[in-house]
Image (cartoon, rainbow, N blue to C red):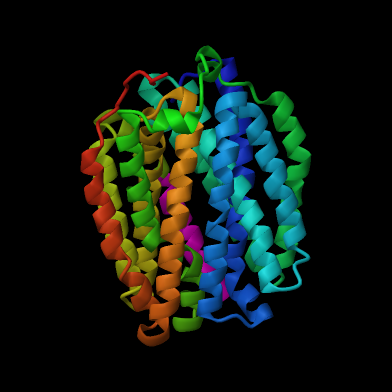
Amino acid sequence: MIDLDVQQRRTLIWAGLAVVLAAFDGSVLVLALPAVASDFDARTPALSNLGSVLALGALGALPLATLADHFGRRRLIAIGVAGFSAANFASAFAPSLTALALLRLVAVCFEALVGGVATALIVEEAPPARRGQAVSVLALLAGLGTGITVVSYPILAPHWRWLFLAGGAGLVAAPVIWFRLPEGRAWQAVRLSGSALRLLMEAPWRRRVAVIALTTALLAVLLEPAGLLFTVYASQVLRMSAIAISVLIAVSGAAGAISYVAGGFLSDRYGRRTPAIVLTAATAISVSLSFATATVGFFAGNVLWSAFASAATPVFGAWSAELFPTRARATAEAISSVAAAVGSIAGLQAVGFISQSAGLGRAIELGGVAALAAAALLFLLPETKQAPLPD
C-alpha cells in the first residue's frame, strides 16, 4: 500500500477522475470502429486516414502543456476535461467520417494534455520510493474508463453515437476538478524562468528528449495501427462477433489490470531501465504474433499484448517524468505525444498502403521491427530509480 497524506489522496482522486473520463472518451472510437466504418461505408485506407488525423491532435497538446509548466497543473487538467468532453458530445452528431475525424482530433488534443499533465502531477506528488506504484494506480483508473466502454458498448451496439453523448458528462466534472484538485507542491516550489522548450534543448535534457521521442515514435508505428484497427481485423478478417470482441477486451483488460500493479511494483523494486527494455520488446513480439496467427493466436496474443504493455505503463510513466525538470516536465510529456503522433501517422499510412496487397494482418505485423528498435534505444537512457526530481 502507498502511504499518502491528505493532499496526495485528493490529488490522486481528482486527477484520477480526469484520467477515467479521458480513457472512456478515447476508447469509444476504437471499440465502435467496425460500426462507424459500416455507417460511413469506410474501408481500411479511409480508417487509416482517420487514425492519422486523430494522431495530429497530439500537436495541439504541446502548446497547452507548456502552459501547464507556467500556470500549474490543476487548471490545465480541468480545461482538458472540458475540452475533450465537449468534443465527445459533439461527435455524437457527426454527419460524416470527415466531421467525426475533425471532432476526434480536438478530443485527442485534450486527452493527450490530461494524460501527460496528470502523470507529471502524480509523479511529482508521490513518495519517491512509490512513484511507479502511484503511476500504476493512475493506469488502473484509465483501465476503469476503458472498461466502462467495454461493458457498455455490447449493450448499445451498433449505436455508437450514444456513448459519445455519455462522454459529455465530463462537462459537469470539469469545474469540480478545477476547484477540488490541489495544485502540485513540487511545481509551486520551483522558480520558473524562460521557455520550457528552450530549457529542454539544453544539456543534458536534449539528448533525453531525442531518445524518448524517437523511442515513442517507433513504438507508435506498431501500436497505433494495431490498437485502432484490431477490432476491424477481428470482425472483418477473423469474423468475430461484437460480443466475442468485447470478451477478448474484457479478458485482456483483466490481465492488464493485474499487470499495471505488477509493473509499478517491478519498477519501484528493480528500477526503470531494465523492466522498460524487456517489456517493450515483449510487447512488440506479442502484438506482431497476434496478427500473424488465426483466432486462437489472436486472442492469446492480445492478452499477452495487454499484459506486457500495461506493465510497461507505470514504468514509463515514472521514468519519463523523472528524466526531466519540473519546470518543463509537462512539456516533455507533450513532446513524447507529438513524437507518438508522427509515428502513428507513419504506421497508419504504411498499413493503409501495404494492406491493399498483403492484407491487414501482415501490414500491422511488419511494424514489429520498428518497435523492437525502440526497445534497443532505451539502453541510451540513465536509470532514475528513487532519484530526486530535477527542478
The stretch drawn in magenta includes residue 266? no
Res 346 quadrant in image: bottom left
- x, y percent for residue 84: 68, 48
- Does the rendering let one see residue 90? yes
- x, y percent for residue 322: 37, 28
| Front-lying residue, 338 or 273 | 338
- x, y percent for residue 369: 26, 64
- x, y percent for residue 53: 57, 63
The stretch drawn in magenta includes residue 257? yes
- Does the rendering let one see residue 157? no
Q: Residue at x 59, y 35 (%)?
A: 16
Dividing the image into 4 quarters, which one contains the N terminus?
top left
Q: Residue at x 61, y 68 (%)?
A: 32
Dividing the image into 4 quarters, which one contains the C terminus?
top left
| Front-lying residue, 150 or 67 | 67
Q: Is residue 126 above or below residue 340?
A: above
Q: Residue at x 52, y 28 (%)?
A: 121
Horizontal placement of 344 versus 180: left or right?
left
Q: Is residue 192 above or below residue 20?
A: above
| Front-lying residue, 130 or 201 | 201
Q: Is residue 200 above or below residue 52?
A: above
Res 262 quadrant in image: top left
Q: Residue at x 30, y 36 (%)?
A: 207
Tell me which segment is drawn in magenta: 241-259
How many labels sit on residues? Answer: 0
Dominant secondary structure of the residues highlighted in magenta in the image = helix
